[in-house]
């Protein structure tokens, strides 16, 4: 029996927080969307700039941005004919920091040991 709380239950996250986390993880479970988030973490970028940095067509990038914005992770602002995107979700910043820390650490460990993982 867990002794963290009087009724034997651990201090679990609320269902609403878990639901938000699951939504964020579903949306971000794509390498291109992770790359887009990495790019946008450096500042506000226009669709054509993101497309160029990702080596994709603008319409492909627009679809990924639409999904990310629909999940509340990004915001957009029109400046003339261009639409610029920036991160609005602090959770996305935390997720990207976690990915960077753990992926870098895993890659460094594998490289040092001479194994693939």
Image (tube, rainbow, N blue to C red):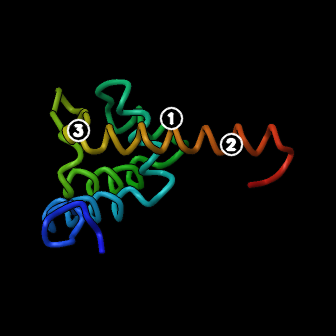
Other residues around mark 3 within 10 Å, as few (<14) / some (14–19) / many (≥20): few
For the residues labelled 3 and 1, the Cα–Cα distance comes to 23 Å
Q: Which residue lies at the image location 83% right of the left edge and 43% below the top edge?
A: 113
Q: Position of residue 44 (x, y in %)?
A: 29, 27
Q: Residue at x 62, y 39 (%)?
A: 105
Q: Pick whichever of labels 2 and 1 is earlier in the sequence.
A: 1
- Residue occupied by mark 3: 90
Left or right: 110 as drawn, with respect to 66: right
Q: Which mark is residue 53?
A: 1
| Residue designated by label 2 | 107
Q: Position of residue 26 (x, y in %)?
A: 35, 65
Q: Is residue 9 above or below residue 98?
A: below
Q: Crowding at label 1, few (<14), some or many (≥20) Cα neighbours within 10 Å?
A: few
Secondary structure at badge 2 equals helix
Tell me the number on the disc at residue 13. Answer: none
Q: Label 2 vs label 1: CA separation?
A: 23 Å
Give the SS element for disc 3: helix
Image coords of residue 24 (percent x, y): 29, 57
Residue at the right extreme of this rendering: 114
Q: Earlier in the sequence, mark 2 or mark 3?
A: 3
Q: Secondary structure at mark 1?
A: helix
Mark 3 / mark 1, whichever is N-terminal: 1
């Amino acid at each position: 029996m867990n002794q963290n709380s009087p009724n034997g239950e651990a201090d679990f996250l609320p269902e609403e927080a878990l639901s938000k986390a699951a939504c964020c993880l579903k949306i971000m479970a794509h390498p291109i969307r992770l790359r887009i988030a990495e790019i946008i973490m450096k500042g506000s970028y226009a669709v054509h700039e993101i497309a160029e940095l990702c080596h994709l067509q603008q319409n492909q990038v627009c679809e990924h941005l639409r999904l990310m914005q629909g999940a509340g992770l990004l915001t957009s602002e029109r400046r003339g004919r261009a639409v610029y995107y920036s991160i609005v979700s602090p959770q996305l910043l935390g997720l990207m920091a976690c990915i960077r820390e753990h992926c870098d650490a895993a890659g460094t460990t594998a490289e040092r040991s001479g194994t693939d993982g």
